[in-house]
Image (cartoon, rainbow, N blue to C red):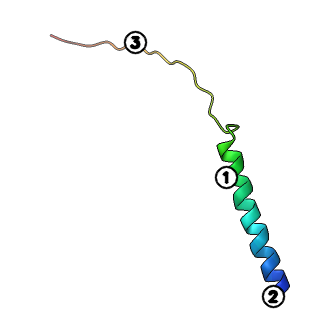
């Protein structure tokens, strides 16, 4: 039982390290685009 618990803990830690490495690698940057929208003002 203790071996399985240690294996699961190591697997979870490796998963967290992998997720952090992937997020900091720059592969998760969002696509950006310029959005312009005209605005009409009623200044009377």
On the image, numbered disc 1 is attached to which residue?
Answer: 20
Q: Earlier in the sequence, mark 3 or mark 1?
A: 1
* Mark 2 and mark 1: Cα distance apart in space: 27 Å
Whole-percent x, y for residue 23 in the image: 66, 46
Q: Earlier in the sequence, mark 2 or mark 3?
A: 2
Whole-percent x, y for residue 34 in the image: 53, 18
Image-quadrant location for residue 38: top left
Q: Earlier in the sequence, mark 2 or mark 1?
A: 2
Q: Secondary structure at mark 2?
A: helix
What residue is shown at x 44% (from left), y 15% (from top)?
Answer: 37
What residue is shown at x 81% (from left), y 88% (from top)?
Answer: 2
On the image, numbered disc 3 is attached to which residue?
Answer: 38
Q: Neighbour class for label 1 at 10 Å: few (<14), some, many (≥20)?
A: few
Q: Is residue 12 above or below residue 4?
A: above
What residue is shown at x 50% (from left), y 18% (from top)?
Answer: 35
On the image, numbered disc 2 is attached to which residue?
Answer: 2
Query: Is the Cβ of the residue at disc 2 closer than 8 Å to that at disc 1?
Result: no
* Mark 3 and mark 1: Cα distance apart in space: 41 Å
Image-quadrant location for residue 17: bottom right
Q: Is residue 40 above or below residue 5?
A: above
Instruction: Find the residue positioned furthest to the left.
Output: 44
Q: Nearer the viewer, mark 3 or mark 1?
A: 1
In-front residue for pair 8/37: 8
Whole-percent x, y for residue 44 in the image: 15, 10
């Amino acid at each position: 039982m203790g071996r399985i618990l240690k294996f699961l803990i190591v697997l979870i830690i490796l998963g967290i390290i992998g997720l952090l490495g992937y997020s900091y690698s720059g592969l998760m940057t969002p696509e950006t685009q310029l959005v312009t929208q005209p605005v009409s003002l009623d200044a009377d």
